[in-house]
Image (cartoon, helix red, strand yellow):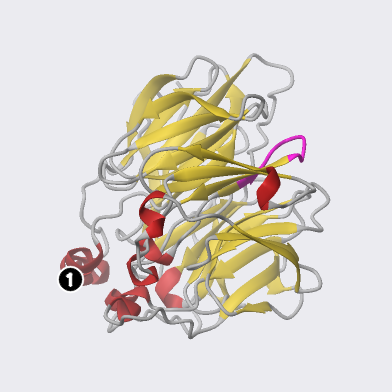
Amino acid sequence: MKIRGQNIRRSVAGCALGVALALAGCAALPAIAGAQTSPTRDVLFVGNSSAGTVDVFDVTTFQKLETINVIPDGNTPQDPLQALAYPTLTAKVGINYVQDIALSPDARTLYVSRGYLGDVAAFDLSSPLHPLLWRTQIHSLRADHAELSPDGKRLFVSALTSDVVEVIDTSTHNVLGEIPAGDYPHTLGFSPDGSTLYSGSLGVNTLDTATSQTPSTDGRHWLEAIDPTTLLPMRAPCQFSEGIRPFTLTPDGKTMYLQLSYDNGVVEYNPAACQTLRTLDLPLAGPGLTTSPHDYPNQAAEHGIALSANGQWLCSAGTIDNYAALIRLPDFSLASTKIIPVGQEPAYAVNSPDGQYCFVSSRGPTANNVSVISYATQSVVATLPTGLHPQVELAARIPSSALG
């Protein structure tokens, strides 16, 4: 760990070519303080990266409750160094105002990792206008995925182009330190008991590989287990040959299901032993039948995975195939997998708080929606319209009064 203020590394020159990276991360369902004793509402937050908004849906009625503007301070970086790189950066990789979102345990504060603005911003959900409370600059050209500690005191953010995970104190809004995390750290997720933070790195500069006809697998593709209290690695990182995409863990934390760059399938993995247990190749369909790996959206064939509350199904978003795959467990076989067509370029998957549904966002140019998939019927039961490029989802059971 590096304490902020010592050896700060901000790689601007050349980093603008390394930020067209993929999405995702598997956010755990936030534990809302007081939710057991007060009236609650189940909601879905959807962060729209091109619109700079977060849509909020009631997941009982499937009605949109509101849309929150998360760039009220403007659509260009506040930081002077970030502003210098911004025109070149967005010309090469496009706009990204919402890379990830997190919710405080009391559901009063929404945190937004604001992509190429290079910062994290906090918004007051308890006030009707949801004003900006504070923003903190990340030492990276892209503020990537974010994960909040279960107690809400620390926000972990992948500083993509600096190869570290930065740690923000949510009370002081200061960066406490940084944790080395392989090349291009991306996906973050806590173990079910909150004792371990996992960080998965992409290991490769995607814009460099975009000029080549063959995908590159160079770099440190790390799955790292981090102690969220000491901010130190708990053991040597697990090494992969490809970039690590979204993952989910079984309730005991012993088994991880993860997706890898270019791999149209799912890996069953033991993260403590760095051991692959089983792999499942999923069928190519739709655009996946003709799309070259060189042209996969953000290098991801599959992107987005959730484990049903009863442990019987994996819900995997088939990004290049325009489907969601429901994979039966413990079978973990193609014969027991249900393929469900959804919108264009599905890229994120989370469960509803009651465990009935898997929400799969589709961010393709003609999609911009979320498919509501019933685990019981194994079908799409509703489609929720979102803002442009629904990047990330977060489902939570919150106090009924939490939204101002």
- Quarter holding residue 177: bottom right
| Residue 367 percent location from the top left of the image | 31, 38
Q: Quick check: 237 left or right of 136?
A: right
For residue 216, what is the image quadrant?
A: bottom left
Residue 119 seen in render:
yes
Horizontal and vertical percent for residue 373? Answer: 55, 30
Q: Quadrant of the C terminus?
A: top left
Residue that carries the numbered disc 1 in the rendered image: 88
Residue 126, horizontal then vertical, whole percent: 47, 26
- In the image: residue 108, left or right of residue 33: left
- Dominant secondary structure, magenta: loop
Q: Which residue is drawn at 44% across and 40% down?
A: 361
Task: Specify whether 106 is left or right of 15.
Answer: right
Of residues 137 and 61, the one nearer the viewer is 61
At horizontal 31% and vertical 51% (from top left) the residue drawn is 97
For the residue marked with disc 1, what is the amino acid?
Thr
Q: What stretch is highlighted in magenta?
A: 306-312
What's the residue at 82%, 58% (across, down)? 254
